[in-house]
């Protein structure tokens, strides 16, 4: 880890969630009545969907809406320029699931602890900030999840920083049909529901920011597509059992607009890593571009079941 900004640690941020938050998240990413263990708080196997921690750096401990732009501008990374946080999108994200989340954080103290891995100047297209974010029990220091992610600051490069390392690629197999395919029809309401989890970026609610960034108007959260696909993969290949997914990652390749139909194609590779099978996937807009590429998960595959 080297270069401007690398190693900088943000102040720890306290985060909190209720069972109601877990229910809303599951509903917003497509869980159905066949999966009551994600949607009914009195179910004997009630569980928080494993990718839920990705929302906590946005939500923090608030139960009210927050000013997204003000929250993003709160801390400056030393040694790098100030970037316009109204023109930022997700680059890619890897999440590692280390311990199952409790159904609620009530009565306990959790923090997200984030440090900068690197700040990379990609020239005219923009700047990438790569970070590691751990969800931690602040008393025991146990790490529940770890996310390695990058944010892409559109059109904000050319400041003389390092270009950064090449990223590892996990291409989808092209020599055979996928082992599973599933889809969803988004609507003008998809992002308006998903944002209630705590990701209140105006880019996903009103057209002005998207026009400013060259998207033509509202786009759906990249993390909606990310979490929706995770749910479908877990349901199709993991028996909807949250303990059957150990790692999950994807690259945000192109925007999704309200009304687009998303189609996920999934391949089992048969390649094992410490008892977990590597899964490859990609998500595309039907009739259009791939929106999530470099898709990979480590899973224990199981038949569909009702928990």
Image (spheres, rainbow, N blue to C red):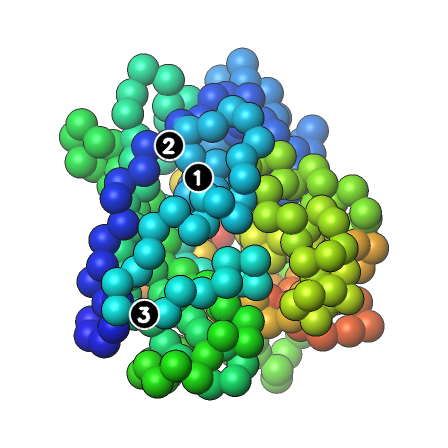
**Residue 44 location, x and y as percent?**
49, 18
Please name the residue shown 61% across and 84% down the image.
175
Q: Is residue 79 above or below residue 60?
A: below
Please provide percent x and percent y for residue 251. Answer: 52, 68
Which quadrant of the figure has residue 219? bottom right
Left or right for 149, reference 178: left
Which residue is at a point 18% across and 36% down the rendered structure image? 141
Q: Quick one: label 3 or label 1, which is nearer the N terminus?
A: 1
Residue 17 x, y percent position in the rendering: 44, 26
Q: Which of marks 3 and 1 is in front?
A: 3
The residue singled out by tag 1 in the image is: 56
The answer to whether the residues at label 3 and label 2 have Cβ atoms under 8 Å apart is: no
Which residue appears at 37% of the width and 17% of the height? Answer: 106
Q: Is residue 8 above or below residue 19?
A: below
- Labels 3 & 1 near each other (Cβ < 8 A): no
Q: Nearer the viewer, residue 294 or 115?
A: 115
Quarter of the figure with residue 149: bottom left
Of the residues tagged 3 and 2, which is closer to the observer? 3
Q: In which quarter of the image is the C terminus?
A: top right
Q: Quadrant of residue 127?
A: bottom left
Mark closest to the chain's N terminus, 1 or 2: 2
- How far is disc 3 from disc 2 in space, using C-alphas? 27 Å
Which labelled disc corresponds to residue 15? Answer: 2
Q: Distance between the residues labelled 1 and 2?
A: 6 Å
Secondary structure beneath dot 2 equals strand
The mark found on residue 84 in the picture is none
Quick check: 116 left or right of 269? Answer: left
Which callout, 3 or 2, points at the residue further toward the start of the chain? Answer: 2
Image marks 1 and 2: residues in contact by CB distance under 8 Å: yes
Determine crowd level at label 2: few under 14, some 14-19, many 20+ residues with C-alpha closer than 10 A. Answer: many
Using the image, tell me which numbered label, if any, was put on residue 80. Answer: 3
Mark 3–mark 1 Cα distance, whole angstroms, equals 25 Å
């Amino acid at each position: 880890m080297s270069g401007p900004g690398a190693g900088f640690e943000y102040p720890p941020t306290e985060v909190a969630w209720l069972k109601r938050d877990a229910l809303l998240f599951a509903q917003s990413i497509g869980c159905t009545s066949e999966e009551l263990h994600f949607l009914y708080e009195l179910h004997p196997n009630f569980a928080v969907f494993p990718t839920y921690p990705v929302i906590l750096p946005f939500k923090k401990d608030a139960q009210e809406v927050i000013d997204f732009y003000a929250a993003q501008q709160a801390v400056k990374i030393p040694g790098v320029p100030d970037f316009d946080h109204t023109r930022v999108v997700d680059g890619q994200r890897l999440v590692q699931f280390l311990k199952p989340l409790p159904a609620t954080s009530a009565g306990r103290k959790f923090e997200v602890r984030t440090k900068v891995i690197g700040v990379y100047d990609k020239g005219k297209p923009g700047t990438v900030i790569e970070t590691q974010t751990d969800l931690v029990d602040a008393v025991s220091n146990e790490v529940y999840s770890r996310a390695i992610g990058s944010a892409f600051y559109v059109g904000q490069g050319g400041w003389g920083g390092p270009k950064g390392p090449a990223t590892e690629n996990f291409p989808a197999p092209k020599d055979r049909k996928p082992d599973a395919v599933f889809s969803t029809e988004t609507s003008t309401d998809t992002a308006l529901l998903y944002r209630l989890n705590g990701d209140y970026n105006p880019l996903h609610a009103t057209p002005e920011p998207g026009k400013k960034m060259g998207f033509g108007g509202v786009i759906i959260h990249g993390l909606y597509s990310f979490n929706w696909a995770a749910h479908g993969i877990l349901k199709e290949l993991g028996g909807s059992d949250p303990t059957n997914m150990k790692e999950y990652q994807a690259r945000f390749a192109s925007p999704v607009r309200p009304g687009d139909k998303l189609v996920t194609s999934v391949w089992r590779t048969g390649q094992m890593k410490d008892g977990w099978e590597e899964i490859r996937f990609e998500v595309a807009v039907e009739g259009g571009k791939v929106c999530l590429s470099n898709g990979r998960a480590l899973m224990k595959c199981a038949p569909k079941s009702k928990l």
